[in-house]
Image: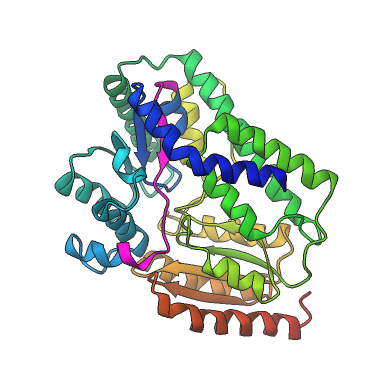
Amino acid sequence: MEAMKRLTDHLATRLTELTRLRKNGAKLIGYAPGGYMPEELVYASGAVPVGLIRGGDPEPVAESAAYVPRFIDTFCRSQIGYRMMGGDPLYEIIDLLVVPVTDHNIKTIADCFNFFTNTNVFRFGVPHQKDEHAFGYYLAGLHAFKDKLEEFTGNKIDDGRLKEAIALCNKMRELLKEISLLRKSEPPPITGYDFVKLNHASFIADKRIFIDILESIHNELRRKPSPGQKGPRILLTGSTLAMGDYKVLETTENVGARIVVEEFAEGMRHYWQNVHVNGDLMQALADRYFRRREPPAWFRPSRERLDYLIQLARDFKVDGIIWYQLMYRSSYDIQAFYFEKMLRKELDIPMLKLESDYDVSERGPLRTRIETFVEIIKAKGGR
């Protein structure tokens, strides 16, 4: 697709553009992903948000051993390793790192940037329950973040600028969702690999350019659907899917299955919900980013996420589920145990659980397991 080439070209020059913007006085606000940091506030302050979502390489994981214990989640160790190695300029040019603290893994990123670099770090807390007290706590964190941005950039965040930023981000989310919903068709018009790369690009690309590209892709897919490949339809879920960690996607689609929908906590953008612009805008942001956000494994009650996954599996008519998680995320390990039983009872479809530490030696065994899983589905009558 021509639009995908435009996106590739844009991303190839994005670092140069961000460097230029910074030289001209713009602040670059890096953030740890997870779905709790409203980019709208960053845009309304005149700054530029940059998601730190890279992963899949073994070298940064090894580098992080000098700074954190091994039992920290692989993705979080990678974020530390990329910064300490100095191999990715994106991790070095940010002016402020924002870390919504959800657990000790994410907190470790903030701690290491604090202790071992000269990066400004701002934290705010994310509670694990969705009652009104928790909502108030999260909302207070957003107000503190707003105050920090105003102080850091010297720009006042007023309702006019915030509404413009919300409209921009809502439009991007709508297009991502519309493109994803096209994958309900048989066959899906876009591969899981291509859609995930689109999703990842949304953390880094210029929003206005990106929206124009998404509109072109959406129109092209609706006008001339790709014939696509036939094979079992797979829902890919788990803990974290980072930019560059594509081995499960590539392997699954290379052995004849199709990834038709994904759900992850970190490294992926949650685009199903938009901000409802009515009443207080800060409360509207908190409503979308906390109250209506699809929860990860450590939210209580955890049944909310499992029910959501079951509904996704029904809506996209999947034949099987691949649960891909990184090492040392025990909450996901526990949830996977319960989910597999729930899945067999409610949908009677199989699940394959995979675990990674970004080690190159994983690829062979991982391919064998995925290949066997796909063949089992086919033998049972799955597409």
Judge whether 382 appears above or below 305 on screen.
below
- Report which quarter residue 349 is drawn in: bottom right
Callout count: 0
Residue at image point 32% right, 66% down: 59
Q: Quadrant of residue 140?
A: top left
Q: Is residue 253 left or right of residue 122?
A: right
Q: Nearer the viewer, residue 365 or 170?
A: 365
Q: Is residue 55 magenta?
A: yes
Render colour scheme: rainbow
Residue 240 vertical placement versus 222 (above, below): below
Q: Is residue 36 or residue 205 the one in the foreground?
A: 205
Q: Position of residue 193 (x, y in %)?
A: 62, 59
Q: Is residue 37 left or right of residue 11?
A: left
x then y, percent, for residue 133: 36, 37
Please report the residue visible at 78 percent of the width from the left and 40 percent of the height from the top.
Answer: 219
Residue 139 in sight from this viewpoint:
no
> In the picture, residue 104 is in which quadrant?
bottom left
Residue at (35, 28) in percent of width and height? 22
The question of residue 188 being in magenta is answered with no
- Location of residue 279 with respect to 371 vertically, above or below: above
Taking the image as drawn, is residue 288 in sight?
yes
Residue 283 position in % (x across, y down): 46, 27
> Residue at horizontal 41%, vertical 59%?
55
- Magenta span covers which residues? 44-60
Instruction: Please state if 176 lies on the left or on the right of 268 as rendered.
Output: right
Split into 4 quadrants, where in the image is the C terminus? bottom right
x, y percent for residue 297: 44, 59
